Amino acid sequence: MDHFDLRPVSKKRSSSALWNALTLAVLITMACLVIYFLILFINPESALNPFPPPPLPTLIQFPTPTWTPIQLEPTWTPTPTIEPSPTRTLAPTWTPIPTNTPFYIFTPTSIFPATPGAPTPTATGMPVVVNVTYMDSSVYHPEAGCNWMGIAGQAVDKNNNPIVGLIVYLKGTLDGVPVERMGLTGTAPNYGASGFEFVLANRPIASNNALWIQLQDQSGQPLSERVFINTYGDCSRNLILVRFRQVR
């Protein structure tokens, strides 16, 4: 007679089912972990990652420079700036002196120094005589006071009418400095219609026959004697007045 195991099997079956369930749970858990780590590997910044990597610093973006050439308008024309020209004071009108005309300066045989306040003699044959006087320059230059010295005067004909356009030649030395001036009658109307003027210094200077003056025509021919002039160092005689007068 065969022997059969008649022990109950319910307890054995329940134990096997429990282990199977646990094994299945472990497999599912492992599968979930694999999927979880795969997601973190693919996307570390996923919200499922409890330790996400720190954010990368933002790079500074500079704007790309754009070169824009400056273009002038088609109708633009540069406008030149005209500098204002200085205002020139015109000299009084006078008759031009002929150029390249040879002449000979008359050399007097005798010299008559000027005496203050008295007429100066003229050499025989000269058509013009010379009178030399002295005065205070404040009459004609009140703003300068005593800080001025000069020679001035006029030229007249036999009837005391002014003669303009004649040459007044001044030469010599003053205080050791050479002096050579040429002027025209009519250029200093303060002394009359045929007036002339030479500024010598900014103070009175005394000298003895160191300067001479002569009236010439436009060709350089002498019309008067060379008249030697004294100058004085005081303010009452710092203006030397010379009057040329035609006698024939």
Image (spheres, helix red, strand yellow):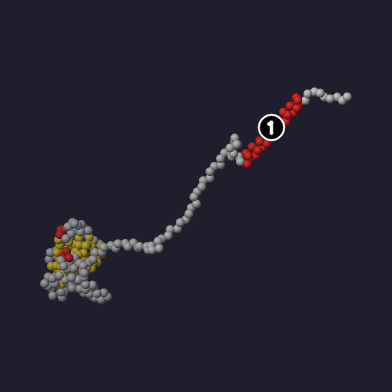
Name the residue nearer the viewer: 200 or 163. 163
Q: Which residue extends farthest right?
A: 1
Name the residue nearer the viewer: 172 or 81. 81
Residue at 56% x, 40% y is 55
Residue 75: quarter of image? bottom left
Q: Is residue 6 above or below residue 58?
A: above
Element assignment for label 1 = helix
Residue at 68% x, 34% y is 28
Q: Residue tagged by mark 1?
A: 25
How many numbered marks are there? 1
Residue 173 place in picture, x, y as percent: 24, 64
Quarter of the picture containing the N terminus is top right
Q: Is residue 1 above or below residue 83?
A: above
Q: Is residue 183 left or right of residue 82?
A: left
Q: Which residue extends farthest top?
A: 7
Q: Which residue type does callout 1 highlight?
A: Ala
Q: Is residue 154 visible?
A: no
Quarter of the picture containing the C terminus is bottom left
Residue at 17% x, 68% y is 194
Residue at 76% x, 25% y is 10
Residue 132 place in picture, x, y as percent: 15, 66
Residue 72: quarter of image? bottom left
Residue 16 place in picture, x, y as percent: 74, 28
